Structures are given as structure tokens and as C-alpha cells.
Image: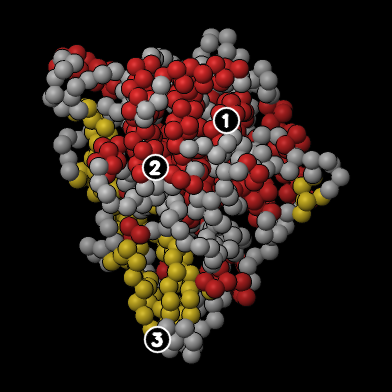
């Protein structure tokens, strides 16, 4: 416990104003507080320079999509993991890295080592949005903060509260979706997911288990696209179209208004109607070749090994995981030279579309940074294209038969939501604040917060009536999905259209007693896809003073306030789907210790096997036979559009409002 407490305090100190240009005085203070001479640090710095670290300069944008950046990151990770260190030795090494490394790369490396270190499982990383608020808050807002600090005086204790707004305005049609794409916690989730599942992880790296990593890459991003489509339909927009025609103009433009505060680097804007260009070391022809090889292998039903002498079959349970590895692409790719790096390198290409050969020394756009990429409309068009690759593989697999769908003797009688009004969910706008003082690279005596608006929904319960007609107790896995019922023109989606729009709402176990009918009640806040609000840095500091045992907290997971899609003012019809399967066949049994396990459906469980043997997204990951709900539905399912719809109604009111943004 004392070791954890020491490391927790150290991490809070190291990440505080991590972008400062000259942190020597901070290092002296931190090392002295742990009884370490500052000379130890200099010995470390000399060694690091000899190892070739420090290539990415301070103030630059670090990108896990960039192979060179990740090579440096994993050199640093290996350096920290090289020997079994005591806490004091690890602190010396981390301080040495901070002085030399790019600040974003440093936070990535240190965070990765801490979440995987067996002694520091309960150390809480500060929220990424508090470490680097300039990745989430517009430069104009930060400029207002600086002016207010000057006006008040540096030693003033008066709280500074500045309202924030979204990028763009209503002249841009895509601005209507900015509330979702620019959601602070959603972008933080995407950064945390790629922190937990880095492209450079391998089973022999000594950094735990990343079970079904390739499949999870597919499923988490597929769900982001499905949820974004729900939001688009909520504002009467059609579903997102795949970015497939790379020689055609990209109609949507985007300007993030984000600027790295310590270096003045702007995330490059992308005006509308720009065309993807060749980069000096990456042409569109290469991207097309990678894509065609992947698609050809999917249609052939096998991948070609690195040695080109083995066919690796795909049309099985593990095929989707292998495809995820070659598409992303990670070091788990069976043949990186042949299948390339389609997903990551295209992110880089799109981020450089405004200055592909760097003749104007332009900085990359938000598509090149995992903490900002979700903000851009092209992210969802690109990931619709990526998802279509996975869907093509799924089309090669047979539809689930009755045996694969049935759970004998379990009958789902009905499904309802219980809120202010049954089977109606209210969404509304809510205001929250972001503490800026921890991350801004200048001193100020007063508290600084930014007030921002986000979507929220009323808390509700699922109420599911289930009958077990057998003489035996049954252990079931309850799976809940929902999807919009109608397209933008008012036509009802077919089952095979709807399956790609199904958003997972929850998944949990329940014991059904023999010969009984029960009401299964589940709170929305307990969903397996969401993460509770992150503890602020101030919360963590306060807990550091207490003796209560700490629980593991992860930053990966859909923000709880985005669980329910926006809906419409007049109400939006959703179909709810509940299926109960045999948990004795589905559950992965492992020792339940104190590990990071929030949002396991989208994030897995850190260093454990994925907690469900079924395919991710089951039963909607494959084609529905005959495109018919009546033929698809079994007694252990409830397809509620056959009875009554769930209405989601958006309310314009702002809860806890200080001002309308």
C-alpha cells in the first residue's frame, strides 16, 4: 500500500504541468522528496542519449499511428521494464525520461508502464484531458484564460470560469454533430483505448495479455460508427458513407482550433473539397495495393504467412482477430510486408492532406493524433470504410443456425425501460467543468475551469421478464442492444441493415431459478460499455490522504453520458433487442482479482481474457438468415419492434445551467 501511495504521489507531481519548458527545478524537488540526489538524474540522462532516445522533439505532436514515434515509445518502455526495479530506481528512470522525451510521448510511456506494472494496479492516472487540456479546448478559450489571469494578477485567488464552445458554426452542416464528435470524454476514451492496446504490443513483450486485440479493434470502432449513425439520424442526417473514392474531393472540411500551448503548433485545418494526396514515402497506389491484398485474402478465405509458404485460414472463430491485426496494422500481423499498414498510415495521410510534402512546413491535422481524431467527420467516413472490410469477412461466414441462437427452456416474455415514463427515455444537455490549472504550462494562483456542454440522459432501469421452464437452475448471459427503427426518409430498416446499427447497451450474467418467472432489473449506470466519470486530479490528491483501500480505475470506456443516443424532440423510435444465452458456455472463467474491468464489452479486461467466448457483437456480427426477424427470433430473445417501440426524446433544457453555450 505504501509503495502504491508513493508512486501515486509521484505520478501526480510528474504529470503536473508536464509541458513546462524548463522543469529542472521541479525534478530537483520531486527527487529530493524521495531522498534521491539530483546527480543520479544526470547519470540517467547521459545513458538515455547514448540509447538514441529523444528523437521526437518537445512541443511536437506524438502519434501512436506513426511507426517512428511508436518505435521510440517502446524503446523507452523497454528501458523502464528492462529489470525488476524498486520504486526508487523506477522514479529515477522516469525523471530521466521526462527531461529528454517529448512531453506527449513521455506521458504515453509512463502511463503504459504504470497500468501494466503489477505493483501499481491501483495507481490512478490523472485524466488525459487535465494533463493536456489544449488537445480538448480551443486555443481561443485558452487565450481568454491567459488574458483573465493577467487582468486578475498572477497571485489572485479569484476563480476563473470560461465557457467553451464547439468548433465551426451552422454554415457547416456537420457542425450539428460537433456535440458528439468533440465530446471531451469520448476523445479521452479513444486515447485510453489505444494506450491499452498499442500497435507494438506482442505476446512476448512481458506486458500482460491483450486477448483478441485485433477483434476488439474491429468491434470498438464498429460501435463508434454505429453510435455516430444513431446521432446522425437523430438530427435527420443520413448514415455516414464510407471514404472509398480516394481521388474524389472530401466534401466535409474541419478546423479543430486546437493549438499546442507550449510550442504554438496548430493542428492543421482541412478545408472542404480537398483530395487525398500522395506523401513522399506513401502513395495512394501503395494504400490501394494493401487494400486489394486484404480483400483478396478475405475472398480466398486465408492469409499468406510472412514466409509466403503457409496459408492461414480465416473462416473460423479466430479469423476476425487476424484480420484486425493486418488492417490496423499491429505487430501481430501475419505478414506486415505484404498486407502493409492500411489503417494507421491512412490516418497519417489524411492528417497531412493540406500539406502532403511539407513544403509549407504545415503541422498535421487531428486525424494524426488518437486523442483528437474522433473530432473530425472524416474519422467516421474512414472507419466506415475500415468496417466494410470486416463486414466483407463476416459475409463469408454462415448465418447463425437455430442451435447457435437457442438457449433451451429460457423464454423472454417482455422488455421495458423504466424511467420517468416507461419505454420513453429523455435526453438533455448538461454542463460540466474541466479543471485547466493542472495542465496549462503557466503559473496561476487561482482555480481555472472551463465550462462545457455535453449530452446527458435520464437514469433508467431495464426490466426484463424471463421464464425458466426447466427443472434446473440456469446461468444466463443477458445481452441488450438497441437501434433506430427508421432511416432518414422514414422507411423501416431491414434486419440486415439494422444489424450494423445495433449498439450494445449492456451485457451481464443472471441466474434463473428452476420453474420460475422473474423480473430481471438492471440499472443503466451498471452498463458493460460505459465508464463512470473520471476522477479529477484534485479527487485523486484528496484520496491520497485517506487510508481507504483504492480500487483500480481505467480511462477506457464509452462516457456514461453518451450511453443513450440523442433522439429527437418529437421522439425517435428505437428497437430494443434482448437475448439470453448460456453463460456456462459463454463465460470465460478466470480468477477475479482487482483488475481494470470497466466497460469490458468495448475495452476487454486488462491482462485477462476477453470475458465472453462469443464473437464480439453476437448475434449481429453475421448476416441474418432470410433477412427476417420472424425467422430469426427465438424464445430466448425479445425483438420489441414486433410489439412496441422505445422512444428517445431530446429536451432542449440545460441541466445545472450557468449559461447557454
Residue 379, horizontal then vertical, whole percent: 51, 35
Above/below status of 475 relative to 430: below
Q: How far separated are the C-alphas under marks 3 and 1?
A: 58 Å
Is residue 351 in view?
yes
Image point (58%, 50%), residue name: 209
Q: Nearer the viewer, residue 366 or 600?
A: 600
Residue 365, horizontal then vertical, whole percent: 49, 23
**In which quadrant will I find the C terminus?**
top left
Q: Nearer the viewer, mark 3 or mark 1?
A: 1
* Residue 389 lies in quadrant: top right
Q: Residue furthest right?
A: 309
Q: Nearer the viewer, residue 564 or 94?
A: 94
Q: Which mark is on residue 79?
A: 1
Q: Are marks 3 and 1 in contact (CB under 8 Å)?
A: no
Image point (37%, 28%), residue name: 35
Q: Nearer the viewer, mark 2 or mark 3?
A: 2
Q: Which mark is on residue 516?
A: 3
For label 2, the SS is: helix
For label 1, the SS is: helix
- The mark that comes first in sequence, 3 or 1, is 1
Amino acid at each position: 500500500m505504501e509503495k502504491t501511495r508513493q508512486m501515486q504521489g509521484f505520478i501526480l507531481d510528474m504529470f503536473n504541468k508536464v509541458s513546462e519548458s524548463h522543469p529542472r527545478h521541479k525534478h530537483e524537488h520531486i527527487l529530493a522528496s524521495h531522498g534521491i540526489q539530483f546527480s543520479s538524474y544526470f547519470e540517467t540522462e547521459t545513458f538515455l542519449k547514448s540509447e538514441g532516445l529523444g528523437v521526437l522533439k518537445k512541443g511536437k505532436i506524438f502519434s501512436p499511428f506513426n511507426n517512428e514515434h511508436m518505435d521510440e515509445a517502446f524503446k523507452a518502455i523497454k528501458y523502464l521494464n528492462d529489470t525488476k526495479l524498486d520504486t526508487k530506481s523506477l522514479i529515477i528512470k522516469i525523471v530521466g525520461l521526462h527531461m529528454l522525451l517529448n512531453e506527449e510521448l513521455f506521458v504515453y510511456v509512463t502511463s503504459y508502464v504504470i497500468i501494466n506494472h503489477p505493483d501499481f494496479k491501483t495507481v490512478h492516472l490523472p485524466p488525459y484531458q487535465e494533463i493536456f487540456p489544449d488537445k480538448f479546448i480551443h486555443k481561443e478559450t485558452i487565450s481568454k484564460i491567459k488574458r483573465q489571469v493577467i487582468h486578475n494578477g498572477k497571485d489572485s485567488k479569484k476563480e476563473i470560469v470560461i465557457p467553451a464552445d464547439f468548433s465551426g458554426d451552422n454554415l457547416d452542416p456537420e457542425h450539428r454533430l460537433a456535440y458528439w464528435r468533440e465530446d471531451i470524454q469520448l476523445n479521452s476514451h479513444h486515447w485510453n483505448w489505444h494506450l491499452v492496446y498499442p500497435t507494438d504490443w506482442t505476446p512476448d513483450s512481458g506486458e500482460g495479455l491483450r486477448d483478441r486485440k485485433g477483434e476488439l479493434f474491429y468491434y470498438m470502432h464498429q460501435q463508434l460508427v454505429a453510435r455516430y449513425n444513431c446521432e446522425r439520424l437523430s438530427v435527420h442526417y443520413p448514415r455516414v458513407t464510407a471514404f472509398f473514392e480516394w481521388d474524389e474531393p472530401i466534401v466535409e472540411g474541419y478546423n479543430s482550433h486546437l493549438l499546442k500551448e507550449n510550442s504554438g503548433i496548430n493542428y492543421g485545418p482541412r478545408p472542404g473539397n480537398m483530395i487525398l494526396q500522395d506523401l513522399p514515402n506513401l502513395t495512394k497506389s501503395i494504400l490501394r495495393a494493401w487494400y486489394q491484398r486484404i480483400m483478396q485474402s478475405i475472398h480466398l478465405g486465408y492469409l499468406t504467412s510472412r514466409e509466403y509458404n503457409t496459408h492461414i485460414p480465416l473462416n473460423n472463430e479466430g479469423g476476425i482477430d487476424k484480420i484486425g491485426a493486418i488492417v490496423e496494422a499491429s505487430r501481430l500481423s501475419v505478414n506486415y510486408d505484404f498486407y502493409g499498414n492500411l489503417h494507421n498510415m491512412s490516418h497519417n495521410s489524411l492528417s497531412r492532406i493540406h500539406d502532403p510534402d511539407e513544403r509549407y512546413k504545415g503541422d498535421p491535422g487531428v486525424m494524426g493524433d488518437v486523442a483528437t481524431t474522433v473530432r473530425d467527420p472524416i474519422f467516421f467516413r474512414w472507419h466506415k470504410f475500415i468496417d466494410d472490410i470486416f463486414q466483407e469477412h463476416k459475409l463469408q461466414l454462415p448465418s447463425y443456425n437455430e442451435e447457435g441462437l437457442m438457449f433451451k427452456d429460457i423464454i423472454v416474455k417482455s422488455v421495458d425501460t423504466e424511467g420517468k415514463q416507461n419505454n420513453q427515455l429523455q435526453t438533455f444537455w448538461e454542463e460540466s467543468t474541466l479543471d485547466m490549472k493542472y495542465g496549462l504550462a503557466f503559473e496561476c494562483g487561482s482555480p481555472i475551469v472551463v465550462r462545457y456542454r455535453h449530452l446527458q440522459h435520464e437514469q433508467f432501469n431495464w426490466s426484463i421478464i424471463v421464464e425458466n421452464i426447466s427443472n434446473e437452475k440456469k446461468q444466463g448471459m443477458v445481452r441488450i442492444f438497441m437501434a433506430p427503427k427508421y432511416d432518414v426518409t422514414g422507411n423501416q430498416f431491414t434486419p440486415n441493415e439494422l444489424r450494423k446499427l445495433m449498439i450494445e447497451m449492456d451485457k451481464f450474467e443472471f441466474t434463473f431459478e428452476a420453474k420460475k418467472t422473474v423480473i430481471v432489473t438492471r440499472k443503466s449506470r451498471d452498463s458493460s460499455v460505459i465508464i463512470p466519470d473520471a476522477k479529477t486530479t484534485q479527487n485523486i490528491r484528496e484520496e491520497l490522504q485517506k487510508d481507504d483501500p483504492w480500487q483500480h480505475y481505467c480511462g477506457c470506456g464509452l462516457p456514461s453520458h453518451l450511453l443513450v443516443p440523442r433522439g429527437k424532440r418529437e421522439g425517435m423510435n428505437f428497437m430494443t433487442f434482448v437475448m439470453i444465452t448460456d453463460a456456462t458456455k459463454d463465460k470465460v472463467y478466470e480468477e477475479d482479482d482487482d483488475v481494470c474491468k470497466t466497460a469490458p464489452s468495448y475495452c476487454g479486461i486488462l491482462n485477462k481474457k476477453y470475458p465472453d467466448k462469443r464473437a464480439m457483437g453476437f448475434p449481429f456480427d453475421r448476416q441474418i438468415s432470410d433477412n427476417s426477424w420472424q425467422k430469426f427470433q427465438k424464445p430466448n430473445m425479445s425483438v420489441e419492434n414486433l410489439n412496441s417501440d422505445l422512444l428517445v426524446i431530446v429536451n432542449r433544457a440545460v441541466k445545472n445551467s450557468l449559461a447557454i453555450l
